[in-house]
Amino acid sequence: MQLKIIATIFRKEMLDMLRDKRTLVAMLGIPIVLYPMLFIVGSQAFMVQQSRVEETASIIAIDNADTNTVRAWLTDVEMVSVVSSSDPEADLMSGQVDAVLAINGEVNATLASGGTLPIEIRYDESEGSSREAVRRLIEALNNQYDVLLDARLETVDIEKSFVDPLDITRKNVAPPSKTTGMLLGSLLPLIMIVMVGVGAFYPAIDLTAGEKERGTFETLLSTPTRTIEIVYGKFLAVFALALLTGLLNLISMVLTLYVQLNQLQQQMDFIVLRIDPRSIVAFVLVMIPLAFLISAIMMSVAVLARGFREGQNMLTPFLMGLLFPAGLAAVPDARLTSTTQFIPIANVALLFKDLMTDRGTLQDVFAVLMSTIAYALLALLLASRIFQREEVILSEERGIPFPFRRGNFKPQNVPTPGMVAFLFSICMLLFFYGGTPLQAALGIHGVYLNLWLMFLLPTILLLVSTRVRLTTALNIRAPRPLAWPAVFLVCAGWLVIVLQLGAWHDSLLPMPEMMVEEVNKIMQFDSISIWILLFAIAISPAICEEFLFRGAILSGLRGKMPVWILLPLVGMLFGAAHVSVYKFLVTSASGVVLTYLVWRSGSIFTSMLAHAVINAGLLLVQYGVTDDRYLPSEVSKFIQDTVIDQGQFPIWTLGLATGSLVAGMIVMEITHRGKPITYSPD
Amino acid sequence: MLDSHKAMVTGLRTVGKEPPTASQGGKSTARPMIEAQSLRKVFGTPRGGEVVAVRDATFTINPGEIFGLLGPNGAGKTTLLRMLGTIILPSSGTCTVAGVPTHEHPEEARRHIGFLSGNTRLYGRLTGRELLRYFGRLYDMADDAIAARTEELTSVLAMGDFVDRRCDTLSTGQTQKVSIARVILHDPDVLILDEPTLGLDIMTSRAILDFIKDARDRGRSIVFSTHYMSEAELLCDRIAMIHQGAILALDTKEALYAETGTDNLKDAFLALVDAAEAHAT
């Protein structure tokens, strides 16, 4: 795959699309013209209407035989005018009066006898003038209520507090900015997500079905480009336009809202617009994979169409369908939870709502980002797969996107990068959806079941079903004898370093108490046997995670990129799989070390051993500081006094650890010098 | 039109590489430029069935030869040409273009091919110059080489008046000239032309046919499909008659006349179809 060719296709498609009027209207017309117009016209109309209502007297009709008393109550009330009506109900419906006071019973007789006079205010909720009339009437009648009550109390010589034992008031503690944030948080994500969809809509159709219809696909396929380069070049253009549309909409909406709401704020003090810039940054960050996901899905669908019109017919339901997950943010009390944060598109909407109301956390952003990336990768792989089907690209028949047959695959030694991306995305999504309920239901048993069912099982199933040899793909081979002492030196050094890294990380980005409690609930050191803990925390990850990350993923990516990209990339994928922003850096760093071991030795057993030893070591440290059976008291006291209490090992300890790590790497390098361990793809 | 047509034909003689061999009538002793061995293409139907579009096509095409594919609509010509052009993969069989196995290195094979058909259109929102730059980059040509080649082709194809206009504003003849410029931009050894004159007016058709003859004279191998018998008679050094996916006969037109006892390609084709159907029953 040549990046230069992808860039050439991308540039051409961008130039082509930016000359397309429909794309320009969707991308620029709506944000630049429509929002300001809508808001300006809307707010102006609102203000005009509001001032007109306030300046116009409310016309009230009284539905009672004895109107004089009630009319007298309202005589001195400002902006209220009482009129006579033979049919008040009909006059209200026709708009001749704004409200009707319906009084059932004799007014004077009832009041004189000390009874309660039932009064009903009839109005038309759909009319602003009618609502204003109700407000004025209630205020006037409340005043009259106080007058009547005072008169009655005076006759029996009772203090008013006697009939008013409770003084109930309500106070909204939410700052005005939060109230406004709630409103915007419900509205903005809906518009943003739909606009990203609108941004991708025309380019996705034009660059696939449109190109088929115009007959330019065959022209492109006759050049020495690979299909995958065409897919990525086109996809990047759709993605860039979708993202650009989303960003332009975001900028335009925020600016318009600032201008307009600041004007409204002068009249209505409950409107306060304050958006934390960090929320905007977080939302833009999440919008990138969102645009990626929507673009990839739209391209996958549009390429199945035979022409532009059919593409529109096929994509319109999808565009409309975006309203449902995006609209979830508008549902009262809908929040980002451990489940909803993995529902595609809805998670972005809910995250934005939480960010606007100052509830979103870094962990929420991280989880939504990771799950959206996983979905986006799957969608892009689907698009690539469909593009590879010549009958879909060239023929007039719609093709079946996924004719999966094992026989279609040639036997291979290692998986392709596409398979790696697919495997990682699937494992992540299974882990997202299966992991939480399993751990909630089974506690520590859910931890290891997760690893075996969500990581190892899909890895083996995918490799077997695509005819990839397990021994080569999973790096199952014995290491050279000197590799073992090298692994132990690396482990000893890294165990100390990782404890120190964890302490530094905690001081910079401490895990919230709630999350610590959740972890403790699962671990329950007091009641669970250490052997079960070792199996769940050390043995199972060493087998399952290693087969996935240092087995299938490493072998699939090896040789496709320089080692200085390969090691951090596999390390970061490993870090991301822990789905916690509080663990990401430290686990990624561990991932790099483990990946190095297999990259250099060619044996999965080196990283399995290291992973098991490091995890077991960390577990024993946690046990050991509270229980002398697991660590010598001197060691546990040293750890407690240094890294746990002070957050810092002594320099000599770190020096020794680094020395051990480097020594292990040197032994590893010498052992395997000049003997690269690689497999050919097939 | 006539002037630009003359310029195009004359100009093409100054464009491109010198011929590797000067052969005529498919009698070259040089290594074949295309070698197809038992090419077969099977398409699946929406109901799960199969349709054989091309059946075991075997032939070679030499440098400096115009190889005609003659057959009615739906005979399998386009599918066969798409397989030669590596736009689709054969279900079975092998093919080499300029010695490059197409199933192993399709991208490398395409560097030797210029592919033009009724279906290969231009990007309407790009100008001719932008389009040539785009395709030149896809062929991995350097930007200055693309610019020089574009100037050269603009001159010889008389495209100066419209090369900087958007393709969707060009006439049919102008569009076809830009298409030809695209096809020969990278100076390919093999030209695959699928019904290139379909729907064109007589002047533009003649320009295309002259372009094909000129390319042959310059040693290029041309695979040319048509259902216009007159074009095949006029141009082709050898002709493969294809019907229902199978090559019924492959030879020079004189040999085909002799074999079928006819004196024109139309009658020869009908005689071969009749014989094939009689044999089948």
Image: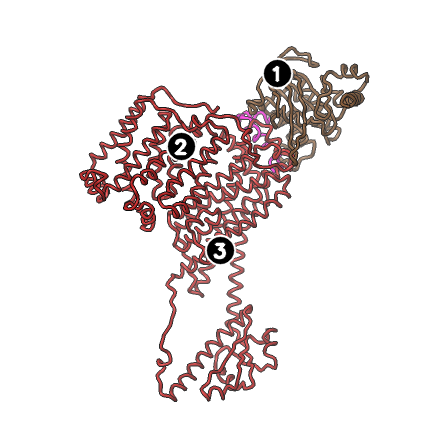
Chain colours: A red, B brown
Q: Is residue B131 magenta?
A: yes
- Residue for badge 3: A187
Query: Which of the 4 image quadrants contains residue A431?
Result: top left
3 or 1: mark nearer the eye: 3
Along the line of sight, the residue nearer the viewer: A615 or A299: A615
- Identify the amino acid type marked 3: Leu
Q: Residue B248: x and y, percent?
A: 73, 20
Q: Is residue A475 above or below residue A76?
A: above
Along the line of sight, the residue nearer the viewer: A400 or A169: A400
- Residue for badge 2: A547
Q: Residue at x 61, y 36 (%)?
A: A399
Along the line of sight, the residue nearer the viewer: A466 or A321: A466
Q: Is residue B207 visible?
A: no
- Identify the amino acid type marked 2: Phe
* Left or right of B155 on screen, residue A52: left
Marks 2 and 3 close (CB-CB < 8 Å): no
- Identify the amino acid type marked 1: Glu
Q: Residue B176: x and y, percent?
A: 67, 30
1 or 2: mark nearer the eye: 2
Name the secondary structure under disc 1: loop
- Magenta-colored span: B122-151
Alpha carbon of mark 2 to alpha carbon of mark 3: how far?
Answer: 45 Å
Q: Main secondary structure of the magenta part?
A: helix
Along the line of sight, the residue nearer the viewer: A562 or A608: A608
The disc numbered 1 marks a residue on which chain? B
The disc numbered 2 marks a residue on which chain? A
